[in-house]
Image: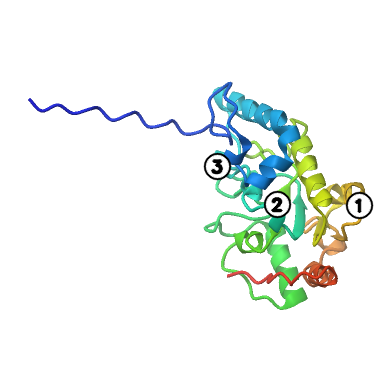
Amino acid sequence: METTTPAAPADPAPTAPDGAPDGARPPLDRIMAPDWARALADVEPQIHAMGDFLRAEVAAGRTYLPAPGDVFAAFRRPLADVRVLVVGQDPYPTPGHPMGLSFSVQPDVRPVPKSLANIWTELADDVGAPTPSSGDLRPWADQGVMLLNRVLTVAPGASASHRGKGWESVTEAAIKALVARGGPLVAILWGRDAASLKPWLGDVPWVESAHPSPLSAYRGFFGSKPFSRVNALLAEQGSGPVDWSLP
């Protein structure tokens, strides 16, 4: 009589960005580039504490954004490759929108969020780039532009809901690791929250303006020419320009 071995059960979908069950502590290089894992070793306990927080949220019937596998998307590219740092606040709170990179959305999102639409308007005015076909900013990330939110998760429909839960110490360590690494590096600071980080930047040059939100874009974001200014500052450090055009 022929017998078959039953298939092993599939692993359950992860409920936290480390993909681990309660109490597990996987190495950071499972969820980010190895040099980022080394740079963030001092805050590894806090990263795992945030995993526990998110698992507890899911166990209580609450969800969070972005998807677990995208929470550390900003850290997929090596620390050594980062040339530009763009600091956001927290992910878009609309399900299906955030992808783990500040200001970026999933490729199929239509219409794009108004802040991103305003970034496109300034992009066209500054460097003459055509209107992109989607709000996916990964082509920037592939050129060394780190799109980092200060808070890496959010509850659906509730902006700023995960502020003060512990992400800030993780992203502070990331920013300070970039500064300690040295240039070439330029920071883009849009809005007051991002501008408050200037004391951490040391000698790193920055481009600062109002936030691209519809509430503030006309108070200094439009006309600020951040993209050409960043490329000029990169050139001063011996680095090539970012091609800001998007497909």
From the image, tell me which residue sits under label 2. 79
Label 2 SS: helix
The residue depicted at 78 percent of the width and 37 percent of the height is 168
- Name the mark on residue 120: none
- The quadrant in which residue 15 appears is top right
The amino acid pointed to by label 2 is Leu
The residue depicted at 77 percent of the width and 74 percent of the height is 126
On the image, the x and y values in percent for residue 218 come to 83, 63
The residue depicted at 56 percent of the width and 59 percent of the height is 110
Which of the two residues, 152 or 183, is positioned nearer the viewer here?
183
The amino acid pointed to by label 1 is Gly
On the image, the x and y values in percent for residue 228 come to 79, 72
Disc on the earlier residue, 2 or 3: 3
The amino acid pointed to by label 3 is Gly
From the image, which quarter does the C terminus lie in? bottom right
Vertical comparison of 64 with 198: above or below: above
Label 3 SS: helix
Disc on the earlier residue, 2 or 1: 2
From the image, which quarter does the N terminus lie in? top left
For marks 2 and 3, give the CA distance. 19 Å
On the image, the x and y values in percent for residue 91 come to 67, 45
On the image, the x and y values in percent for residue 221 come to 83, 63
